[in-house]
Image (spheres, helix red, strand yellow):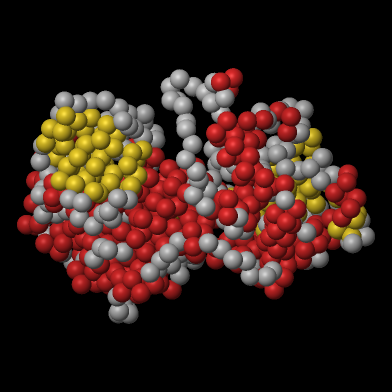
Amino acid sequence: MDFIAGEISRETFIADYWRKKPFFLKGGAKKLLQTSISAEEFARTANTIETSNPQMVKRDGDRLVFAQRWDSANQRFKKISTRIAQTMSWPDVWFDGVLASDGHSIGCHYDDSDNFVLQQEGTKIWKLHPPTIIPQEELRQRMLKNPEVGNIFMPENAIQFVLEPGDLLYIPIFWPHWGVSEGPSLSVSFVCNTSNAVRELIPVIREVLSHEPLWWEPLPMFPVPNYEKGMDLAKGDAKPLESVMDNLLDVFQQASFRQKVIQSWWERRAERIWGSHQQKETPTSGAQHLAIDKDWVRKISGPPLEAINVKNLVSIYPATLQTLQRYTFRIYLKRFLLSMSKGFGMLNDYRPKEYLQTLLSTMQRMDAASLTEAFHCPEFTSWIKRFAEAIQFGYPPRLEQLLYQMGGFWIAYFLQKDILLEQKEYWVSRSTSHTWQLPSLGMELVSDHELPEVFPIEKQQADILIKLGDSCYRLPASFFVQGARKVQISDSLRWEPLPFLPAEKVAIIQKHDWYKPLLSHRKEAFLEDPAFQSFSQQVVKAIHQLKETWPEAYKEFRQSVYTILPYDSDLPSKDSDDLRMYRGLAYFSPSAQRPILPMLLIETARNRLHAIMDVFQLFHNPARSIPASNGKEHQAQGWLEKLVITLQLRQLATRSGGELSLEWGAEPYRVSEIISLLSTCGELTENGQRFLEGCTALETKLATRL
């Protein structure tokens, strides 16, 4: 069978090039694809993917668009990837693509996949180098899907290829490569994702072993020497373990076992390549699937929601905002359950799988109001996105780490409701090196010594056990429902109240490792005492002022902001994609010399806009850069954010009778110019146009008052 019609057979390609050296073929892309894709079609496909799966599309303004697995939204190319996969007999294949302007690139890196670059438009200069410059340990980490490895510098003695429209370049696995556009260009890559025995074969062996009596029956009792003294092989310390191991490994020598493994392995591969009709149904154990109570999902989702007009979300109407919150709750619930289900199948060890099931089972004991509150907290909304990204990279250790971080968040709600399951370990991550914070309870565990990075909590009858290394601390379960207070547990361990506003359900966080990515521009950016105490007092005063000045905005603040994070530096440029992860968060710097009240309103408005964009698609391309007449340039989404914030502050000015300055926390762009920029940019969807109409109507109304 010809791999590329009339040019090279599959057998020759595998023998001479596959994972050995690059292969360039002039006009090969046309022969392999037997079609092409335009920049316009690719851009539309990337926008479609971004709507449903944002983490699969990376943008650098209008300069570069990198879309992964874009054939999932393009039926024509999905058929092509299926055809090529069957020709190559390779189970995990897809198309990536890069649309770039002159001189732009996604950077020099290497992949754990074999890639076929198929140039569609323009010219691209490629530099490649053999993988001999990459350490073996780094290759191992890459094959285990560690997302932190892969970037590399290109040596000077690189091999160079020039790809023009219709050309093909095969890049073997692990080969560092760097493609730079020469003028506007579009290239798509047919990706043959690799696997290894750890990820592909061990699950098959585990499944077959689960039906072998010696492997599913209880292990016998055998003596184990004190681990501090070590094992002395000369004295025969290992003989009991060797005997058990020999019995277990005997099954691997049986021809019937090998046949079952080969049959199951073949069936799984055949299903992935040729479709489910080729595979017999394979029995799976209950532990391979996350148990989700569908009746609970239907009940907690509630009845059908009333229609909501996005135009009405510009102004603050408490009833409409409550409906918006119910919409977003359903979206977050769906994302959460999908991520949990996918992540469960990727976890390798028994403990995190069991813990994931325990967390979900406990969540199903919560009431709808508590779940809605939890699902809108910034720790959780950002966790959903981080977990989805970890699934995309397929790196189980990162999934486990995130799982324990989520446990630290949910355990506070479980303790508050006293719904922990008996004799189940709930693993949690510390908040800082010396604290474990429970914001929803308004308290933190403080240790004079460094806390373990991860530790278990367990309920035994009416007590809660906190296990810190070799020490175990017991507290009555009622302690966590009696309110925050200072309690000394031992000479070096104590509970202390967090700065917390119970009436508003807002926690003011002094330090927390979860928020470090937001503050990456400074090594130590969190606000320290006594400035932190002064800031907390200013926040309380500002909230009371808001309640008196603008009751409707105060209600929105209570509905949308759950955590306030001050930091000790000037305001950074706020990346919208990062901020949208942290729904329910207000973060700003007291050192910026701006009054607290307008800053609270700015963050409230920003959170509302991001929630709206979770429900409604307002832009075709929110990352498109749009310049203003004064030379300022922002992405389309950034201009809309400035518009919403400015309108919020103008309303505050009218409510206060002009006492509160319009310039607090907002750059002095004319609202009419921003509206004009957005209305003529051509990126607004129908819902985006409606939202802009609401902004225009509100601005007209405000203009008569100021």
Residue 489 in the figure: left or right of residue 208: left
Please state if 291 lies on the left or on the right of 71 as rendered.
Answer: left
* Residue drawn at the location 49% of the way across and 22% of the way down: 230
Give 432 or 152, whichever is nearer the viewer.
432
Q: Quadrant of residue 464?
A: top left
Task: Count the marks.
Answer: 0
**Up-down: is 115 above or below 269?**
above
553 horizontally vs 116: left or right:
left
* Residue shown at the point (22%, 36%) measured from the top left: 473
On-image quarter of the C terminus: bottom left
Estimate the x, y position of residue 437 in percent, counting from the top left: 24, 41
Q: Is residue 230 visible?
A: yes
Tell which residue pokes out farthest to the right in this image.
Answer: 6
Picture coordinates of residue 703, whole percent (x, y) = 21, 64
**Residue 68 vs residue 459, the one in the foreground:** 459
Split into 4 quadrants, where in the image is the N terminus?
A: bottom right
Q: Position of residue 656 (x, y in %)?
A: 10, 56
Q: Quadrant of residue 584?
A: bottom left
Which of the pair 43/459 is nearer the observer? 459
- Residue drawn at x 81%, y 46% as measured from the top left: 18
Residue under the image location 19 percent in, 30 percent down: 493
Position in image of residue 158 (x %, y %): 76, 32
The reply to whether residue 680 is visible in this rendering is: no
